[in-house]
Amino acid sequence: MYTGGVLMPVASLPSRFGSGDFGQESYRFVDDLAEAGFGLWQILPLNPLGYGNSPYQPFSSFAMDEIYISLDLLEKKGLLEHVPSYLKDADAVRYEECRKFRTKYLRKAYAAFKGDSRFDEFRRQEWVRNYTVFKTFKELNEGRCWLEWEDPLMKDFFKQKNPDLSPYEDEIRYQAFLQYMLFEQWNDLKDYANSRHILIVGDVPFYVGLDSADVWADRSSFLLDRDGHPTFIAGVPPDYFSADGQRWGNPIYDWKRIEKNDFDFWVKRLGFTKNMFDMTRVDHFRAFDTYWKIPAECPTAIEGKWIEAPGYKLFDRLFKEMPDLQIIAEDLGDLRPEVYTLRDHYHFPGMNVIQFTFRTDSENRTAENCLCYTGTHDNDTLYHWYRSMSLKQKRAVRKWMNSHKYKDKDICMDFFRYALDSKAKMVVIPAMDILKLDERGRLNTPSTVGAPNWMWRMPSYTAFEKKMPVWKDLLKQYKRTAG
């Protein structure tokens, strides 16, 4: 399959309510991709956004964030009357304001919701029960991390015998209603995308957040002390992005315990995403080979050591259970050869990011079994990356492009052609690069927290749709048209 795709977070899509959701504007985006001939839509994790609104510090590996519920679709379902627009033209996602506005109407929709046997069956799933109880308790504790909860029923819920949840039952049911609506709307959107020959590329963080239903409900799978605090945390040593390394703070897995349990934790997790997406990009794939283990008391990621993980045993178990599992390995960074050996043993496509690999002093080669990107959610935009080069570097890039038949006046177009002309089976272009945005279009800067990370938003489709005829021609020219 030789195809092209677009990287676009759902939250960054246009919407009447300040942040993208699973409503009509998502269907419009699918239509735009299909009309141009794209075959992939890559998104970011849809899980409940955690610290700093990061999709890589989620409150659950299974639940989705209610910010993606379409109020318009709830109206069509008869659960709401007309909802006025809010922050429709904002150029950034104002998460707290959006949540406050949406919650008012989500509560109204819940009041009108009757439920049925399908809803009751949905609620009985283990992950739904765990998450809805966790989220209810979290709300009652003003959003604080579960480690700070004082009520032993809440903090150590799974140690209790026959806990009485009757005082919280309605709120738990409300949280289940949110997830029920999310999965109903998402499944409809995915089905529509597939009907238009668009495959959805999902994204799974390697680690889970400390403040998550995963850790709260299954502490034995992580390296924690008796009180639940991490003894070791995740990150990476000093690298391209940070001289102090990246200290993510996620708890480290207790791999001995997970292996003893036949890797059920990962079977459930990736099995769940298999049903949500057509392909799943696994972030920080290298940690299936070796992971950076940082003592929790260390203030930076400099101190730590590489520990081997049971990657082969895990994937053997996964493919025994799910032989058609489609995984994309995020294999970026300075990796030891064994990581690529692990990747290739299971024929996982890797990633080639042009901003990291493009050279003007040698031939640029891209592997066939990979996804080629101009950049990712962690990179600067292509336009600003090039604009930040020295004059000497720019001249070298132009000279190389001209000598390899890429001679457009727009240097971004040259890079697009270079990517599409590569051997890579799949080429994915961030929407921000298609729009030729400057640094204000950057989605995230690694090792930093807070605004403006994850806040970029496309207020309308006007500029994007003007670009689509050009992309339709490009995809045809390089024989990457889907459908």
Image (cartoon, rainbow, N blue to C red):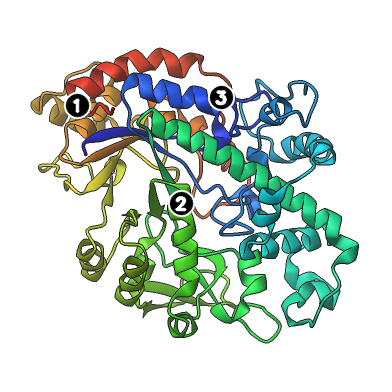
| Amino acid on which disc 3 is placed | Glu
Inter-mark Cα distance, 3 to 2: 23 Å
Q: Is residue 114 left or right of residue 67?
A: right
Q: Which residue is nearer to you in this view: 310 or 166?
A: 166
Q: Is residue 210 visible?
A: no
> Mark 2 belongs to which amino acid?
Asn
- Disc 1 on helix, strand or loop? helix
**Residue position for label 1:** 398
Q: Considering depth in this image, is 384 or 365 the residue closer to the camera? A: 365
Residue type for callout 1: Arg
Q: Reading the chain from its start, which is encountered first: label 3 or label 2? A: 3
Q: Dot 2 corresponds to which residue? A: 275
The picture places residue 125, in percent across and down from the top left corner, at 63, 62
Q: CA distance from mark 1 to mark 2?
A: 44 Å
Residue visible at 49% across and 63% down in the picture: 269
The crowding category of the residue bearing disc 2, from other C-alpha atoms within 10 Å (few below 14, some 14 to 19, many at least 20), is few
Relative height, residue 82 to residue 126 (above, below): above
Residues tagged 3 and 2 counted as in contact (Cβ below 8 A)? no
Give the mark toward the camera: 3 or 1: 3
What residue is at 52 percent from the left and 31 percent from the top? 440
Foreground mark, 3 or 2, reads 2
Q: Sort mark 1 into few (<14), some (14-19) or many (20+) by Cα contacts within 10 Å.
A: some
Residue corresponding to mark 3: 25
Mark 3 burial class by Cα count in 10 Å: few <14, some 14-19, many 20+: some
- Please state the horizontal and vertical placement of residue 256, each as a whole percent of the image: 45, 85
